[in-house]
Image (spheres, rainbow, N blue to C red):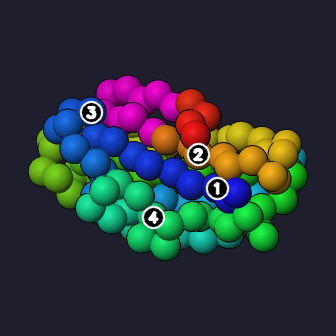
């Protein structure tokens, strides 16, 4: 069923087109890069799934969203240091036969996430 993400910019009320996202597998403090994406006009990976069902494994993962870079590119003036820079979400995959969707709702000052469908 795979792993996907979707980012919505709650400041502007739009998908976070152009945001940079990185995915890692994690083992304790060690993180291994799986891939990097720039989100499309819908705020999603242009490749569709970040990890397809054949490659998804039970274990822990980390999604890193370049929030400050995205808002700066949109022309938002951020204080120095900015409140949010990189948002890292560590999560676990327990059932590879299920879809894991990790959405992010974000502004320069807040974010929320949940396991979507």
Residue holding disc 1: 3
Residue 23 rendering spot, x and y as whole percentages:
62, 60
Do we see residue 65 in this rendering? yes
Q: CB of mark 4 within 8 Å of CB of mark 1?
A: no
Indicate which disc, 4 or 1, sits on the residue closer to the N terminus: 1
Residue holding disc 3: 10
Q: CB of mark 1 within 8 Å of CB of mark 2?
A: yes
Classify mark 2: helix, strand or loop. Answer: strand
Q: Work out whether residue 13 or residue 81 is closer to the camera in this orientation and state it.
A: 13
Residue 103 rendering spot, x and y as whole percentages:
49, 41
Residue holding disc 4: 45
**Structural distance between the alpha carbons of marks 2 and 4:** 12 Å
What residue is rendered at 58% in x and 40% in y?
117
Classify mark 3: helix, strand or loop. Answer: loop
Span shown in magenta? 104-113
The nearer-to-camera label among 3 and 2 is 2
User: 58 above or below 81?
Assistant: below
Indicate which disc, 2 or 4, sits on the residue closer to the N terminus: 4
What residue is rendered at 38% in x and 62% in y?
39
Indicate which disc, 1 or 3, sits on the residue closer to the N terminus: 1
Q: Work out whether residue 39 or residue 56 is closer to the camera in this orientation and state it.
A: 56
**Structural distance between the alpha carbons of marks 4 and 1:** 11 Å
What residue is rendered at 49% in x and 73% in y?
47
Indicate which disc, 1 or 2, sits on the residue closer to the N terminus: 1
């Amino acid at each position: 069923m795979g792993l996907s993400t979707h980012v919505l910019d709650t400041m502007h009320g739009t998908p976070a087109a152009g945001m940079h996202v990185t995915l890692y597998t994690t083992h304790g403090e060690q993180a291994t890069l799986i891939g990097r994406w720039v989100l499309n006009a819908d705020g999603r990976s242009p490749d569709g799934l970040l990890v397809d069902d054949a490659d998804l494994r039970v274990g822990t993962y980390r999604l890193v969203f370049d929030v400050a870079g995205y808002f700066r590119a949109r022309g938002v003036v951020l204080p120095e240091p900015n409140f949010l820079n990189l948002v890292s979400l560590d999560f676990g995959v327990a059932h590879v036969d299920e879809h894991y969707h990790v959405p992010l709702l974000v502004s320069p000052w807040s974010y929320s996430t949940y396991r979507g469908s």
